[in-house]
Amino acid sequence: MEELLESCHVAHSRADRDRYVKILEKNVKPGKMGQFAKQAVSPINIFKNPYDYGSILHYSAFAFSKNETFLRTIDTLKPADIGQRYFLSHLDVAKIKHFYQCAEVKDASCTFDFDLCDWTQDYKLVLEDRQSFTLNDSFSDDFDFLKLNSSTLFTEYTPIKDHTTGFECEIFTDASIQAD
């Protein structure tokens, strides 16, 4: 995700960042201050987005620290959590949409509980009795997936436990198989 934002010219460090965070230079590893260089004004920032503490691009408070256990390199000038790497923030999405001149998009949330959320593949896995399965082979792509829940078939590659109650569904893909 970081690379996607960087390709859209969304910078790690805005030109006006000193209004929102303070970089503690004395705590930064030698040779790493360049990671905190302020960027020139980007075409993405001219539409006046607020500062995005929650951006997937925002460094953590201990990024490039001489001692990542207790030496902070970034202080926020207002209380805020920084450095999350789990999802795009709403402002990250807005910046991407602005860059690509996108209209409003549909809700992208999907649980896979009732359908495949527009996912398609060339072969189907048919689960019978929640244990056995039949493959109808038609392998013309290199990417396949399974729709699972915790009572479904398990192999050495499928998760034994997940974050759901066991009744929700999930999509499983096997990253251990390299496509040709």
Image: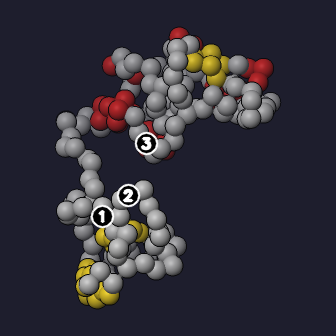
Number of residues whose C-alpha sits closer than 10 Å to that of mark 1, classed few (under 14), some (14–19) or many (20 or more): few
Element at badge 1?
Answer: loop
The residue type indicated by label 2 comes to Thr
Q: Quadrant of residue 172?
A: bottom left
Number of the label disc, if any, that sits on residue 33: none
Residue 83 shows up from this direction: yes
Residue at label 3?
87
How many angstroms separate mark 3 from mark 1 (CA)?
24 Å
How many angstroms separate mark 2 from mark 3 (CA)?
19 Å
Q: List the single residue furthest toward the top.
A: 19
How many angstroms separate mark 1 from mark 2 (CA)?
7 Å
Look at the picture and state if 116 lies above or below 139. above
Residue at label 1?
167
Q: Where is residue 128 shown, x and y percent of the image? A: 25, 85
Q: Nearer the viewer, residue 97 or 58?
A: 58
Q: Nearer the viewer, residue 112 or 2?
A: 112
Q: Is residue 34 left or right of residue 107?
A: right
Picture residue at 74% right of the left edge, 29% below the top: 70
Element at badge 3?
Answer: loop
Residue at label 2?
164
Number of residues whose C-alpha sits closer than 10 Å to that of mark 2, classed few (under 14), some (14–19) or many (20 or more): few
Picture residue at 35% right of the left edge, 32% below the top: 90
The residue type indicated by label 1 comes to Phe
The residue type indicated by label 3 comes to Phe
Q: Where is residue 132 shown, x and y percent of the image? A: 32, 87
Q: Where is residue 114 shown, x and y percent of the image? A: 19, 62
Q: Where is residue 25 shown, x and y percent of the image? A: 73, 20
Number of residues whose C-alpha sits closer than 10 Å to that of mark 3, classed few (under 14), some (14–19) or many (20 or more): few
Look at the picture and state if 131 lies above or below 27. below
- First in sequence, mark 2 or 3: give its number: 3
- First in sequence, mark 3 or 1: give its number: 3
